[in-house]
Amino acid sequence: MSVRIRIYGQEAVFSQGHWACPDESLQAMLEALADPRALSPEQEQAHALYAAGRYGGLIATDYGWEAAPHPEAEIKLEDFQPRREPKKPGVGLLGLLRRKG
């Protein structure tokens, strides 16, 4: 079973792990996201929904065209930057000059 999406006014079809689209640049963008493991109808639907959401497109349903939800970010800043703890008073370069009393 194939799944149709519409992005930038162009329609594309995802079937058996590959995209087909009359617009070559859009097809290249979609092929960059293609999941060759998506062979079952459920996997094809999930992948097409993901691709349409990434580019702000629509997906064909039984009720017509529906906006695809934007997918969750795959990489977040927290993945690379450790969480910073608040500084304690008296710690740091100027903390050495402070009188202890």
Image (tube, helix red, strand yellow):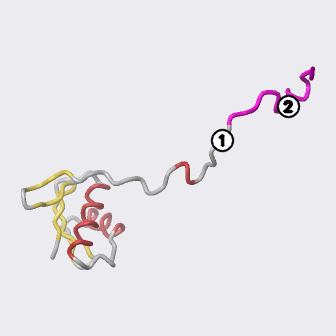
Residue 12 lies left or right of residue 73; in this view the side is: left
* Number of marks in the rendered image: 2
> Which corner quadrant holds the C terminus?
top right
Magenta-colored segment: predominant secondary structure: loop
Element at badge 2?
loop
Which image quarter is the N terminus in?
A: bottom left
Disc 1 or disc 2, which is closer to the eye? 1
Q: Position of residue 29 (x, y in %)?
A: 32, 63
Q: Residue at x 13, y 60 (%)?
A: 60
97 inside magenta stretch = yes
Viewed as shown, does residue 11 lie left or right of 55?
A: left
* Residue 45 in magenta stretch: no
- Residue 25: image x %, image y %? 28, 63
Which of the pair 73/17 is nearer the observer?
73
Residue 61 at x, y percent in the picture: 12, 60
Q: Is residue 7 above or below residue 92?
A: below
Residue carrying label 1:
84
The residue that disc 2 covers is 93
Q: Inspect the image, locate mark 2, and give the three-letter code of the amino acid beneath it.
A: Leu
Residue 37 lies in what quarter of the image?
A: bottom left
Q: Which residues are magenta?
A: 86-101
Most distant residue in the front direction: 101
